[in-house]
Amino acid sequence: MPTRTSHSHDRRSRWLGLAVLTLPVILTSMDITILHIAIPTITQELTPTPSQTLWILDAYGFLLAGLLIVMGNIGDRIGRRRLLLIGAAVFGAASTLAAFAPGPEILIAARALMGIGGATLMPSTLSLIRNMFTDPAERTRAIGIWTASLSGGIALGPIIGGALLEAFWWGSVFLINVPVIVLLLVLAPRFVPEYQSPASARLDMLSVLLSFAAILPVVWAIKTAAEELAFTAPAVVGLVAGVLAGTVFLIRQRRLEEPLVEVGLFANPRFSGAVLGAGLAMFSLVGVMFYSAQYLQLVAGLSPLIAAVAMLPIMAAVGGMSVLASVLVPRFGYPLIFGAGAAVAAAGMFTFSRVPVDDGLILAITASAFIGAGIAPMMTLATDVVVGSAPPARSGAASALSETAAELGAALGIAVLGSIGTALYQSRVLDGVPTDLPTEATGVVSSSLGAALSVAEQLPADAATHLNELARHAFTDGLGAATVTGGLVLIVTAIACPILLHRGRPQTRSTDGTAETGQQ
């Protein structure tokens, strides 16, 4: 049996420990979206190339996705709180480096280092929750709060970023992490118990290398395809190489006594449905958030701060439904709540697809709130199922699997939905762009809505008005196509994942010791 290295915590201590564990969750998730607000200012100050701009945005998620599985296993072996504290220190140092980066190269390196630190935080927090809350009902509520922190951080990123950019320079969006990290380093040793597996086999380095070779090329191929709007030869090579490495990785895991990934867990439809649901939920959520921030600022014309404030109802919906999910599950069961969440999010997607160019602000906020309210219980329940399916000694590795699925889903969401929206935007713009516009300017206009609006500022009044209207309508058309696609994905999720969750539902014991079917 695994042993805790600190005394057993009472109920009050457990919930205080959970409050401490929400700090790194909010930070790492907030960092995913805070750059959406800050990147225009950063590009003006540091003048990165288009490729460097992409890597400023993606280096964090790239390293995060590639290292989650490895870090989850390391935490099981060296102690999850210890890994949490090490990762927090790395994250804080990298945030400081990013805040004062003199050029795009240093900023990219700092973002990559933040990804390494972030990869230690997510699986550590989830696995510690798994061991702090042994009662299933308590654990579901705790994971609901964890999910609310995760989703709330994603929604909070643009709000904090907008407020900081109103008062400070762009580096403040990174420097804000440091005091929170210091607070975590002080409080975690006091309120969070240490936990590690006593039977810690040596980490299989070949499996580690194979996991990198499987995940990193696939993520790179997806992001490259999104940038080029097509699977180029290098992207195809990267995708094939990643799939081959992943196949070898899975074969090796079946032969190891202490594998990085418990492949046998996927034989349980409940576990597979939860991992699939987490990936598809993030696919849709991140894809639509990619558009909503641009719509509020570039189409509706809101300032960064006002756009951030307009997203507060979304954060409230996400936080409320994440916690409410744990209350509804004992009465209605996991499959029904998960399916209902996916259906609500799909309805929000289809509503968002109807947002007009003018006077669409209220509809956009309302639709986004429905999307968040539906995605939140999906992520809560998927995470709870994944963490609860693994034995306590392997909860770090299981948590990393859930997070990896979510990260890959997010990368696919940006790639697929972003490509659909961009392709339609370019088609609409190129069909209506003025013929007397220089070829170079036409290429800039077709690259993005922000670029088109910048070009319009340099044109005479009539031409500027025409280009503004053309670009805004083209963007809204692309947004509509992308969100309809996301809605269709969620409809499939609402049907398939509850079936898997139902087929693999566990049996619980009643108070008299007889077996009965659990609602989970």
Image (spheres, helix red, strand yellow):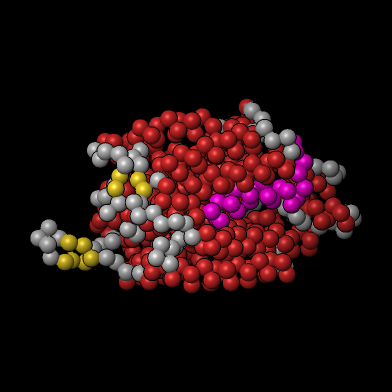
Q: Please report the bounds of the magenta region as a residue range.
A: 45-67
Is 269 left or right of 291, judged from the image as shown?
Answer: left
Name the quadrant containing residue 316: top left
Is 51 left or right of 314, judged from the image as shown?
Answer: right
Q: Position of residue 503 (x, y in %)?
A: 32, 71
Q: Position of residue 46 (x, y in %)?
A: 75, 38
Name the quadrant containing residue 162: top right
Q: Position of residue 12 (x, y in %)?
A: 26, 36
Q: Magenta region's main secondary structure? A: helix
Q: Is residue 507 above or below residue 366?
A: below
242 falls in the magenta region: no
Is 296 left or right of 82, judged from the image as shown?
Answer: right
- Residue sitting nearer the eye, 368 or 466: 368
Q: Residue at x 80, y 42 (%)?
A: 457
Q: Is residue 329 above or below residue 45?
A: below
- Residue sitting nearer the eye, 317 or 204: 204
